[in-house]
Image: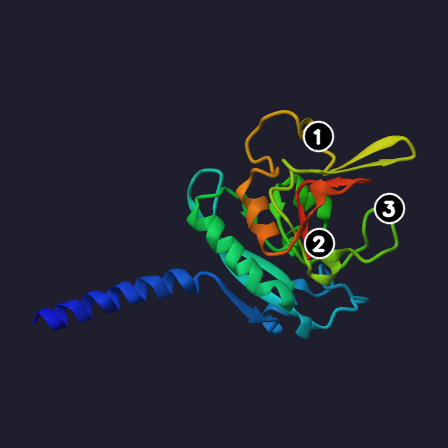
């Protein structure tokens, strides 16, 4: 009887672990997912083969302390990294307000960032250049975007993305959800070999991690 009781407990524990693990998974881009991104993040002139991309399902802790489901599309080469990073962030209770496909914002990066959405793939060019962004390759992730803006000086004028993030430009201030080198998000991404935009010289992109 003790053996069967132990076996039952082991099966329940194993099922619980599997259920938790199964909340973090990668899948190929099937017809259903492609229908959601076609003409939006996956534009008609996109040069990235669908076979190079993966759909990720993750869990995250929202700003209210509650668990939420999240979705990303990324390059297949970083899928395993992201699953590990997001699972560790979730287990640590790290707060990320939203993780939604940018297609829910019609692939409008400014709208997505203003809503503090964290996302990955979106075929586009780097702001103020003609070079394809790492996001366009699915090799970059932006986290808690409103609180960690992109900042660049163009023709003597400071340009901020999202434009509503002005109060978070001064990184000497202390405020919630700020990514810096002491932040767990920074530590996990850099541990996995990602580069942080907050360390760049010509621009600062505090939300941005790329590989």
**N-terminal-most mark, 1 or 2:** 2
Question: In the image, 23: left or right of 206?
Answer: left
The reply to whether the C-beta atoms of the residues labelled 1 and 2 are less than 8 Å apart is: no
The percent position of residue 55, horizontal first and vertical second, equals 58, 65
**N-terminal-most mark, 1 or 3:** 3
Label 2 – label 3 distance at C-alpha: 18 Å
Image mark for residue 211: none
- Residue farthest along the right direction in this orientation: 155
**Considering depth in this image, is 139 or 29 the residue closer to the camera?**
139
Please give the residue where the numbered disc 2 appears in the rendered image: 107
The percent position of residue 59, horizontal first and vertical second, equals 47, 54
Question: In the image, 88: left or right of 210?
Answer: left
Residue located 87% across and 50% down the image: 129
**N-terminal-most mark, 2 or 3:** 2
Can residue 159 be seen in the rendering of this structure? yes
**Considering depth in this image, is 174 or 200 the residue closer to the camera?**
200
Q: Callout 3: helix, strand or loop?
A: loop
Name the front one of labels 1 and 2. 1
Can residue 68 be seen in the rendering of this structure? no
Among the 4 quarters of the image, the one containing residue 47 = bottom right
Label 1 – label 2 distance at C-alpha: 24 Å
Q: Residues within 10 Å of mark 2 (few under 14, many from 20)?
A: many
Q: Residues within 10 Å of mark 1 (few under 14, many from 20)?
A: some
Q: Residues within 10 Å of mark 3 (few under 14, many from 20)?
A: few
Residue located 82% across and 47% down the image: 127
Among the 4 quarters of the image, the one containing residue 125 = bottom right
Q: Quadrant of the C terminus?
A: bottom right
Q: Callout 2: helix, strand or loop?
A: loop
Please give the residue where the numbered disc 1 appears in the rendered image: 169
**Considering depth in this image, is 104 or 72 the residue closer to the camera?**
72
């Amino acid at each position: 009887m003790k053996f069967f009781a132990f076996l039952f407990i082991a099966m329940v524990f194993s099922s619980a672990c599997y259920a938790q693990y199964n909340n973090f998974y990668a899948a190929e881009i099937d017809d259903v997912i492609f229908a959601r991104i076609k003409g939006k993040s996956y534009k008609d002139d996109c040069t990235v083969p669908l076979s190079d991309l993966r759909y990720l399902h993750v869990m995250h802790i929202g700003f209210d302390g509650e668990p939420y489901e999240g979705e990303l599309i990324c390059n297949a080469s970083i899928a395993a990294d992201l699953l590990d990073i997001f699972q560790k962030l979730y287990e640590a209770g790290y707060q990320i307000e939203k993780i939604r496909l940018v297609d829910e914002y019609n692939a409008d990066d400014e709208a997505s960032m203003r809503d503090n959405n964290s996302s990955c793939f979106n075929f586009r060019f780097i702001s103020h250049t003609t070079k394809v962004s790492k996001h366009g390759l699915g090799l970059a992730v932006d986290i808690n975007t409103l609180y960690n803006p992109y900042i660049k000086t163009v023709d003597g004028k400071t340009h901020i993305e999202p434009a509503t993030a002005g109060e978070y430009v001064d990184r000497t201030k202390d405020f919630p959800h700020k990514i810096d080198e002491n932040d767990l998000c920074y530590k996990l991404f850099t541990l996995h070999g990602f580069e942080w935009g907050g360390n760049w010289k010509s621009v600062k992109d505090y939300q941005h991690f790329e590989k």
